[in-house]
Image: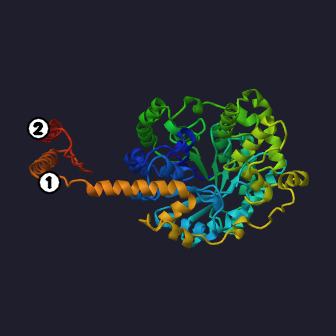
Amino acid sequence: MARVKITETVLRDAHQSLIATRMKLEDMLPILEKLDDVGYNSLEAWGGATFDACLRFLNEDPWERLRKIRSSVKKTKLQMLLRGQNLLGYKHYADDVVEYFVRKAIANGMDIIRIFDALNDVRNLETAIKACKKEGGHAQGTVCYTISPVHTLQHFVNDAKTLEEMGADSICIKDMAGLLIPYEAYELVKAIKENIKIPLQIHTHYTSGVASMTYLKAIEAGIDVVDCAISPMAMGTSQPPTEPLVATLKGTPYDTGYDLGLLSEIADYFRPLKDSYVQSGLLDVKMMGVDVNALIYQVPGGMLSNLVSQLKQSNAMDKYEDVLKEVPRVREDFGYPPLVTPTSQIVGTQAVLNIVTGERYKMVPKESKAVVKGEYGKTPAPVPDAISKQILGEEKPITCRPADLIAPELDSIREQIKEFMEQDEDVLSYALLPQVAEKFFKYRKDMKSKKEGAPEENAGEANGEILAAITAAVASMESKPGYNLVVRSFRRVPQTAPVWSTAGRLQRFQTKL
């Protein structure tokens, strides 16, 4: 038995799960130093949907976000989630793009890269794992947990062993749907630990309500690291809360050694943020409840809400139960893929179409066809011949690694965006999300032009008075016993600010301090 370590997810998966990845960098920066002081195994701070959300919704450069987080987090390892050959986009990319992305992620401050594939096809992880190892990063191979006739205990053990043989530095059991119940977790962790020599981590979601119990049984079975979120951003579709687990393990052989007082201070910081998300409508309180349907239908909570949305658009909510029953049938037809991005969306959409049209596979989106054809990789079980023929016709499935069919892309992408490039990493942003990235590049260029064209602020008498007041305040405070004053930043009052605002600030410095 050994101390259990925790990866904190509040900077990535917690807000991705609860508020669609909308936490801004400015909301993270003030608390980073305290998070760094906890002693976490790692801080998950990048990857997943954050890359897309930064560019698409927040007008943030995801690479600059990573650099700023790294500059504030000095002691704790940073961690990210990577979708194997899909990187942080929604299709397979050429090997040169994957290798360059991993190189730049590590160069900008990333330490641990958790690499997964929606089909558990290890061929789709190999390039990223090798690139991570080459750059000196920690490559964490991932086994996506799901339930099906082919996903046996031995199946998962074999996957973990293969990843270790490929060079993975650790393994993560990724339970994206919250399906892993406590006693099953004990058996799974025990079996994998008996067959690998590298550390084992577990990731789950609170969707079905069993996650904290699952962690306790996983800990008893020998898990090394668990993923948690600080309590205001925990539970619901997020992860189990950090503080209760730390308190539960205190004084036991599994004691994390973390300071509950410090964790409470961190929770105090995020609590008003959470309230603001609720008030703005960004956080739906329904997301915080338990959804037992996740266990009954073995479908992730996010997938259920997506099915409802599609049925409402088709004015077919009366067919909801039929669609839920169709999902496992489609999943079986498609070779039992784990239901995680993008396969959960593909299977769900096909199930809706099968029911709404009244005929199975009358309408087949290109994504469904791609799964059956092998363009996402090898499915856990073979696609039945009858389904393959119905969907593909005379086309033949591919059996090679999908990326083997993709020519190198980097040079041509650089040529396409040379007018927008301001940093090496821009070519990767464009490679993953061309339209979204180009829109952001134009926004960035416009903001830079406006800033450069703005009249220079007058550094005259008022600024001199402010500087004098600050200097006097610092000297006065330092002369008093028991004070240790640190000035962290200055913010210039813009010329457009009202006179009374500037005068008020001066008065505060000169008389209050």
Amino acid residing under circle 2: Thr
Amino acid residing under circle 1: Ala
Residue 461 at x, y = what percent?
8, 50
Which of the pair 180/478 is nearer the observer? 180
Q: Horizontally, is 369 left or right of 257 in the view? A: right
Which of the pair 481/413 is nearer the observer? 413
Query: Do labels 2 and 1 touch, CB within 8 Å?
Result: no
Residue 480 at x, y = what percent?
15, 44
User: Relative to 222, is 400 above or below?
Assistant: below
Task: Report the residue at 82% width, 61% height from top.
Answer: 397
Task: Report the residue at 60% width, 71% height from top.
Answer: 96
Classify residue 262 by image quadrant. top left
Q: Which mark is residue 511?
A: 2
Classify residue 296 by image quadrant. top right
Q: Which mark is residue 459?
A: 1
Task: Report the residue at 64% width, 44% height from top.
Answer: 204
